[in-house]
Image (spheres, rainbow, N blue to C red):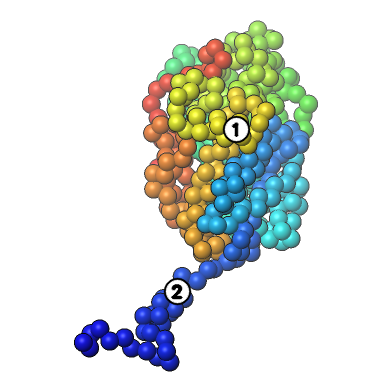
Amino acid sequence: MKTNRRSFLGGVSTAAVLTASGSAFAQKKYDDGATDKEIKIGHTNPYSGPASSYGVIGKGLEGYWKMVNDRGGINGRKVDFITRDDAYSPPKTVEVVRQLVEQEKVLCLFNTLGTPTNTAIHKYMNQKKVPQLYVATGASKWGKPKEFPWTMGYQPDYHTEAVIYAKHILANVKDAKIGVLMQNDDYGKDYWGGFEEGLGKDIGKVVKRVTYETTDPTVDSQIIQLKDSGANVFFNIAIPKFAAQAIRKIADLGWKPMQYLNNVSSSVASTLRPAGIENSQGIITALYLMDPTDKQWNDNADMKTWSAWMDKYMPGANKNDGNYIFAYSVAFLMEQTLKKCGDNLTRANVMKQAANFQKQRVPLLLPGITVSTSPTDFYPIQSVQLASFKGETWNLFGDIQSAEGS
């Protein structure tokens, strides 16, 4: 019958011609850093310098990509993860990032750490149109797709976190007199701006605010000033090295304020143990990830998977360090982003896929917290839960609270 006849063009069936022409729309597309066999990702981390306690994040990311490669990579491509030490020094960050982009020719940067360091490369990355994805800093500036369409954050933003602390103080501390220690850069200022907003007309309750530089040997003199101000509340806006010094000095002075600690220093291993577990009792922070010291997660499937991964890929590493939880969770999200790209591994498509998550479950996020993004929303995680330190672990309390981007 006519309907069953096959038409041939030079010995090739029309079905074959259609298949061939159709495949033209599914051709592989690559920018620098991507081939049939590999995806090249760049990363910077302070393996040395004042923020070196965060160096374990880079080690954790290396372990995650090794696991991915052992499983066969992403859509058949191995991940070449190139990490460089920037010592938490913005000029050094600029130097190593130029090498990653212009010499190593990475497809994207992933989880570069630090507010001052990411600020130093912010405009450069956007001018070069190279993704600066899931940066390891909660500054609110990473969620501005109109001005900086090639940069996206990951964790809840500092501004909103500080608003939540301010409102908790006003609701729970009678006759609050607040002392603030803050790092003197964009990271400290972002937290301070949110804290100001949260206090509103009660900003006068801040009786003393002092700053420190990352080049300072200690913050002892600043803590003495805050105690002498008569403050009964202490807001600790510091990276782990200085946050731990502050907590320890407060104990040495016999000062007993209600203490609030920014999330980026909430690791029991990196901050609270160096400060002294006994000195850390009652401190309040905001969490969005499961804490490895919290026994309520011992039978959680995500935590069991993470623990097995730690045993295999991070042998001997400290399982009490929440930075490894952070590394695993953010690397999972990056893996999903690259998977969604399929064979279209252009920088534009990487950003397009990053901006297209709807309530994505990411391992080790607290129950009720998911990742959502859109072309106009570059704040992937917008919720936290308050926790207080009791015994040797964080204890969650209250409801999940959502951030400004929602």
Mark 1 secondary-structure assignment: helix
Q: Which residue is denoted by mark 1 in the rendering?
A: 310
Res 55 seen here: yes
Q: Residue at x 74, y 43 (%)?
A: 85
Q: Residue at x 44, y 17 (%)?
A: 172
Residue 366: x percent and y percent? 44, 31
Q: Which residue is denoted by mark 2 in the rendering?
A: 23
Res 185 seen here: no
Q: Residue at x 54, y 36 (%)?
A: 158
Residue 98: x percent and y percent? 72, 56
- In the image, taking residue 226 as reference, residue 178 lies left or right, namely left
Neighbor class of circle 1 (other Cα within 10 Å; few <14, some 14-19, many 20+) is many
Residue 149: x percent and y percent? 53, 57
Label 2 sits on what residue type? Ser
For the N terminus, which image quadrant?
A: bottom left
Neighbor class of circle 2 (other Cα within 10 Å; few <14, some 14-19, many 20+) is few
For the C terminus, which image quadrant?
A: top left
How many numbered circles are shown?
2
Mark 2 secondary-structure assignment: helix
Residue 182: x percent and y percent? 64, 29
